[in-house]
Structure formats: C-alpha cells, structure tokens
Image (cartoon, rainbow, N blue to C red):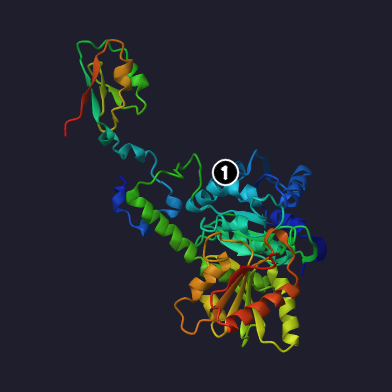
Amino acid sequence: MTKSESEWTWKELPVGNVVLEPGNASQYRTGDWKSLRPVLNKEKCIHCGLCYIFCPDMSYNLNEEGYFIVDLFYCKGCGICAKECPTGAISMVEEEV
Amino acid sequence: MGKRVGMEVSIAAAEAVKQANVDVISAYPITPQTHIVEYLSELVANGEFDAEFFCVESEHSALSVCVGAAAAGARAFTCTSSQGLALMSEITYIASGLRLPMLMIISNRTLSSPLSIWNDHSDVMSIRDCGWIQFFTENGQEVYDHVFISYRLSEDRNVILPVIVNMDGFILSHVIEPIELIDQERIDQFLPPYQPLHRLHPDRPVTMGAFALPSIFAEAKKAQEVALRSSMPKILETWKAFGEMTGRYYHPVEAYKAEDAETLLVTMGSFGETASVAVDMMRQEGRSVGLLKVRLWRPFPFDELKKAALGAKQLVVIDRAISVGGPGGPVASEVKSALYGSDNRPVIYDFIAGISGRDVAPQDFIKMVDKAEIEIEEGNREGYEIYGVRE
C-alpha cells in the first residue's frame, strides 16, 4: 500500500517520480468530484449491463444478485449511465452534503 | 593518442555520436544542424553504425522518440536549431522531469522573426529553465569532447539528467578544424555501456510520467532542482577524468589572462576564441584586460564566477541574445545575480553583439571595452546597449 501523496518528502521520491507499484491509481478517490449521483431502481432494471459498458470510469460492478452496482468511491457523477439506461432505471440525484 | 584530422565540426560531432555507441538517433533536419543528422543517417544506412535512426515528422516527435528510447533503456541522441528547438521545447521539460539521460546538440541559430538562419543564442535561451545540464563550446574539439563527457555525466547514477551541448551555428557547425579524434578503445573505457536505474520493461512494470497533484508537485520539483544543482561535483569530476585521458581539461568558467586584470570581458560560446585574440592585442598595448569564458550555463557556476570576477574593476559582458524588456542579456543578468551579494563588486557593462550571425571581430571587442571603460569612467554604472546598431 503506497502512502498518500501528501505524506511523501522530496527526498523519498523515486528518481524521475517513477511509480514502482503497478496499479496504484485504484487508490485515487475520484468519487468526491460529483455533484449528482446515480440511484438504481431495481424494479425497472433488466440487467442489460449498458451502464457497466458505458461507464467511462469502470465504476459499475456486477453483484451476486445480477445487478450492476455503482462504486461511489470512483463515480464522478457524469450521468452517462442514466442517459444510456434503456428503461430509465437510473436517475441522477443531488449529492447530499 | 588519437589522430588529428581536418574535418567539419558537424561531422566531428556525428563521429563522436557514433563512437559513443548511441542506440537511438531521432532528429529532424533544420539549418544549421542538418549536417550532423545527415551524416549520421548515412553512417546508419551504410551499415557503419549500428543504431536505430528514426525519421520523424517534426522536432516535437524527434525529442519524444528520445524520451521513449531513454525510458526503455537506450542511449539516445538528437540535435536541432532555432525553430526546431522551439517546437521541441514542451518535451525538453518532460525529459528532465522524468530524469532521462540523453544528449542534444544545439547548433545555435536565431529565432524568427525576422526570419534568419544565422547564429545567436536566442533559441537555447528560450528553454533556459528546462532543467537540462547545459554546456557552451568554443571550438570543434570541445564539441567532439563534450559528446563523451555529456553521456558519461548524463548516465551517472548521481546525476541522471539530460544534457545540452551548445555550439554556435555556422561559426562552429560549418567550419573545418583540426580535430583530435580519440581511439575507440579509450572511449569505451571512459564511457561504459548505459545501465538505467529504472526502465520500461514488461518483466518489471513501472509508470513514468504520472500525474502529480498539487500536494506532491512541489516535492517533485524540489527533488529535480536539487539533482541539477548537485550535479556540479560530478561535472567537475567527469571533466577531470576526461582531462586525465586526453590532456584537455575543462572548467565551468575559463579564465584567460584574467589574473590582476582591471577589465574582464565575459563571453559564452565561440565568442571566446575571438575575444582572446582581442585580449592579446590589448595586452600588447599594455592594457589591463582579461577574459572569462562561461562554459557551464546550467547549473550556473555562481561560486566559480564570483571567484574569477571579484577583484576586477569592471566586467564587459557580451551577450549573444536579447531578453526583450528584461534586465539586459541573459549572461549579464546571471553575472549580476552572482555578484549582487558581494562587497566591492565590479561595475558591469552589458553589450548585445553578434545577433543573427553578424560578425564580431577582435577590433569589435576592443571597441566595446573602449566604450565601456569611457562610460563607466563617466559614471554610467548600468550600461546596456546593442553593439554596432546603425542609428
């Protein structure tokens, strides 16, 4: 686990700021960028997976019940999933502060 | 010892690139750098030089290829001039920020406009702060020698920075000079194969060129700044090792008849040789004039310059680039910064001369010293002018 970028001192940085640990971008929270968040109405969902396919941040994951569920740690609230959903099962609601 | 051969300086530079066992060459032709890249492409095409030669569509791509090659662990070379360097400028900051060793020779040429193919230092001054180690050379031998010096320094584990060797376009690049070529065996001893610290390889994946948030950017830049500043001992050590091999010793600031001189000329690049002739002429007339030649432009040798300049009454700095609307020429500006904190600092008179390749003869240096001495005598302590402009 890489430590948070705000903890590194200049002397600790690898030469050229090379990132030596592969895949650590997954530790970066983009979920706090959003002002709207997607909410799924499971009654309307037909499990087509278009939200999963179109999500530009790969924030949707298939759960054990067969629903595609958004991971709000990454979701930026762009609304593409709601726009693409053919049954209108996803609606964008305002983030609560 | 090696052979002494009469050859064009650009060809000597290309020969040095071959002798340095460069793996990847990527360049786009632009006057007056063209002969270097032309000759290298011939060597590769004829099978005389085992390197990858990339024909790219622009200088932006030329340096980008070098960045990729160095990231993959190759020894990379490029060269350019003027507008080509301007187009490359974005990537110069990337190469140094990523700490990728490589060499770029700049055959210095004026930046447009007005369009001009001739020599001055306006091209490299546009990327002054790009974070590369930057040398200036006075003659062809220095260009040839600094190819080996630069690669050894650039790849040193205590340095790991890209290097620029500046040579004045046409004045050096197109001139035929006797060049002492060094035997390959000795080059191979001086310059071992490149062993990258980090490189792109599928067996051990790393990310280069990642995004940095404001919370870490300043730390990254501090690390880069310290790396460039603390390369100085290694620069001196590399020059010393080269001197022991060839008998040619180089220093950050070269002094010529400077001891006890009341007036010191300060030059950078090929001006140095002509100015030394002018100093000889003035010394013959009994005038107390010497010369300082700035060889290392980045990291700027503040201490060496101070040591060499303090004691003189006045410095006559001859710049070959204008900082329009700025504090005078770029060299004078640095010299003033170097001396600002010192007591009894000399008065500095700054001339811009030889821009866009206008000839500056020994007599011109004498005229500039005459003018500066009179002006300073009359109380002008902040002299700055473009020399020889028709009013």
Taking B279 as reference, is B300 above or below it? above
Image position, residue B79 (x, y; %) = 66, 51
Element marked by disc 1: helix
Taking B290 as reference, is B8 above or below it? above
Taking B262 as reference, is B121 above or below it? above
Disc 1: which residue: B64
Image position, residue A94 (x, y; %) = 20, 27
The type of residue carrying mark 1 is: Ser
Comparing B8 with B19, the one in front is B8
Comparing A2 with B177, the one in front is B177
Task: Point out the residue furthest to the right here.
Answer: B6
Q: Residue at x 42, y 56 (%)?
A: B221
Label 1 lies in what chain? B
In the rendered view, does A75 fall on the left or right side of B266? left
Image position, residue B300 (x, y; %) = 53, 68
- Badge 1 density bin: few <14, some 14–19, many ≥20, Cα 10 Å: many
Q: Residue at x 67, y 51 (%)?
A: B114
Quadrant (top left, top right, bottom left, bottom right) of the N terminus of chain B = bottom right
In the rendered view, does A51 fall on the left or right side of B328? left
